[in-house]
């Protein structure tokens, strides 16, 4: 099985802690023993700090996106370092490079690709490009809700269709550093490609392992 994992920066790098990167690396290695694995690393709070600084300097949103991409690639390099010899040594900068890197038999880790795309969108496009069997979006939120989980009355959804996912996330804000369960582009890619997707709380790396290897999770599954 080919698995693409989007690991949000909010859980991968809430702070620059080498032990945290090590825990995710061990989980990814466990999955890679049985499946072909691609990982897209998010930027998290660190990326948002950089983006806010450059925005305060009157940079446009495309520049803000590029700054965020640079941070995701740094996080990808840190994860590659944690994975050691099991990982392809350089983060691919596009989807063709990612596919070629996988021919090495190593775990492929990358960050952002282009302005206007969050790492969720990158993961969805990558999954489509390489014809992945499963896309896992690991975030700090335990699934997809009817509205922002912070809102009173927000209801968690265990199983939804791609069309329902699109309807929910189309209300999301599209700008550099925006925080949402998934961006509209990622949702539309999932809808058109019919990629089996699981959105879950990946704060504990073991939950990602359980979802991929055992099919057990408490998140939201996008049913086809």
Image: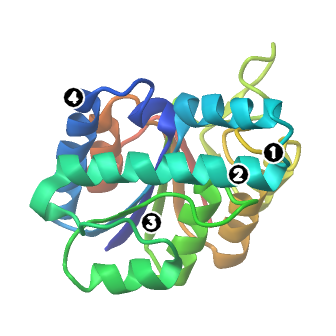
Q: Would you place residue 211 above or below residue 128 in this image?
A: above
Report which residue position mark 3 lands on: 134
Question: 10 Å neighbourhood of mark 1: few (<14), some, or many (≥20)?
Answer: some
> Which residue of the protein is positioned furthest toward the top in this rendering?
152
Q: Nearer the viewer, mark 4 or mark 2?
A: 2
Which of pointers 1 and 3 lies earlier in the amino acid sequence? 3
Report which residue position mark 4 lands on: 19
Query: Which residue occupies the foreground of this view, 158 or 12?
Result: 12
Q: Nearer the viewer, mark 1 or mark 3?
A: 1
- The quadrant holding residue 202 is top left
Q: Position of residue 146 (x, y in %)?
A: 78, 34
Question: 10 Å neighbourhood of mark 3: few (<14), some, or many (≥20)?
Answer: some
Report which residue position mark 1 lands on: 175
Mark 4 to mark 1: distance in Å?
Answer: 31 Å
Regarding residue 183, the answer to whether it shows in the image is no
Contact check, label 3 and label 2, Cβ < 8 Å = no
Question: 10 Å neighbourhood of mark 2: few (<14), some, or many (≥20)?
Answer: many
Task: Give the residue displayed 41% in from the left and 40% down from the top.
Answer: 217
Task: Give the residue displayed 56% in from the left and 59% down from the top.
Answer: 112
Query: Which residue occupies the foreground of this view, 87 or 49?
Result: 49
Regarding residue 153, the answer to whether it shows in the image is yes
Q: Indicate the secondary structure of the residue bearing disc 3.
A: strand
Mark 1 to mark 3: distance in Å?
Answer: 27 Å
Question: 10 Å neighbourhood of mark 4: few (<14), some, or many (≥20)?
Answer: few
> Which residue of the protein is positioned furthest toward the front in this rendering?
57
Which of pointers 3 and 2 lies earlier in the amino acid sequence? 2
Quarter occupied by the C terminus: bottom right
Report which residue position mark 2 lands on: 65
Task: Give the residue displayed 62% in from the left and 28% down from the top.
Answer: 49
């Amino acid at each position: 099985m080919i698995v693409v994992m989007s690991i949000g920066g909010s859980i991968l790098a809430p702070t620059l802690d080498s032990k945290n990167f090590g825990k995710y690396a061990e989980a990814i290695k466990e999955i890679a023993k049985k499946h072909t694995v691609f990982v897209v690393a998010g930027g998290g709070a660190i990326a948002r700090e950089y983006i806010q600084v450059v925005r305060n300097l009157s940079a446009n949103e495309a520049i803000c996106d590029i700054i965020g991409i640079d941070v995701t690639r740094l996080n990808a390099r840190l994860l590659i370092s944690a994975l050691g010899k099991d990982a392809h040594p350089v983060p691919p900068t596009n989807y063709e490079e990612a596919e070629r890197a996988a021919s090495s038999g190593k775990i492929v880790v990358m960050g952002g690709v282009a302005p206007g795309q969050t790492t969720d969108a990158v993961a969805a496009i990558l999954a489509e490009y390489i014809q992945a069997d499963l896309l896992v979006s690991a975030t700090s939120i335990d699934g997809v809700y009817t509205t922002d989980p912070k809102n009173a009355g927000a209801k968690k959804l265990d199983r939804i269709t791609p069309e329902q996912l699109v309807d929910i996330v189309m209300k999301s804000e599209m700008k550099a550093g925006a925080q949402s369960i998934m961006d509209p582009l990622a949702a539309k890619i999932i809808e058109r490609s019919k990629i089996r997707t699981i959105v879950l709380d990946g704060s504990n790396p073991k939950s990602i392992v359980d979802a991929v290897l055992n099919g057990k999770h408490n998140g939201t599954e996008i049913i086809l």
